[in-house]
Image (spheres, helix red, strand yellow):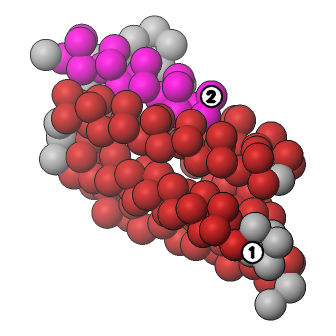
Amino acid sequence: MNKFSKILIMVATCIGVGYISGQVTQSSVDTWFPLLEKPSFNPPNWLFLPVWSTLYVLMGVAAGLVWARIDFDKDEVRNALKFFFIQLGLNAAWSLVFFGLKNPLLALIEIVLLWLMIYETWFKFKKLNKISGFLFVPYLLWVSFATILNASIWYLNR
């Protein structure tokens, strides 16, 4: 399989995970979330879809580029992709915990674990492919912001 195919598979996987997470939690986004008190820096709801769509594409490209190195660094690539899929699972789980369970405190604990897995994935990716490391930076920054936002929402609604 060529590099382009690997990138497309990873992008489709990331977008698919994001889509499923969004569909599962949409009712709470429309009903429960608007009732919460939010900090002044809470972005408008319309911003989340384009930001997450962009991040899922960047994540997928980064993972595809790393996967393309499998013939050169087999063990390192497998290890990096293992962390990638762990963080992708945690990414989906956050939506379920925050919106599905309506539990900002548990979601805060979960997003800290997610951030750590994203950081570890970034660290492994940048060693294998500098572009992949660069493509993961916006995701790491956004989840840093999301962690602060999650903590603020929990604090304001405890």
Name the one closer to the observer, 57 or 38: 57
Label 2 neighbour load within 10 Å: few <14, some 14-19, many 20+: few
Question: Residue 127 placed where, x, y %?
Answer: 76, 47
- The label shown at residue 156 is none
Question: What span is colored magenta in the figure?
Answer: 140-157
Residue 38 magenta-highlighted: no
The residue labelled by disc 1 is 70
In magenta segment, residue 150: yes
Say which mark, if any, is on residue 141.
Answer: 2
Q: Say which of 142 and 114 sits in front.
A: 114
Q: Kindly identify the residue that appears in the image at 53 percent across and 23 percent down.
A: 145
Q: Tell me the kind of residue under disc 1.
A: Ile
Q: In which quarter of the image is the C terminus?
A: top left
Query: Residue at point 61% right, 34% down?
Result: 140
Q: Which residue is painted at 65% across and 40% down in the image? A: 123
- Judge by depth and name the residue closer to the eye, 54 or 7: 7
Side (left or right) of 144 relative to 66: left
Q: Which residue is drawn at 86% across and 78% down?
A: 4
Which secondary structure, mark 2?
A: helix
- Residue 121 in sight from this viewpoint: yes
What amino acid is labelled 2 in the image? Leu
Q: In which quarter of the image is residue 112?
A: top left
Number of numbered discs: 2
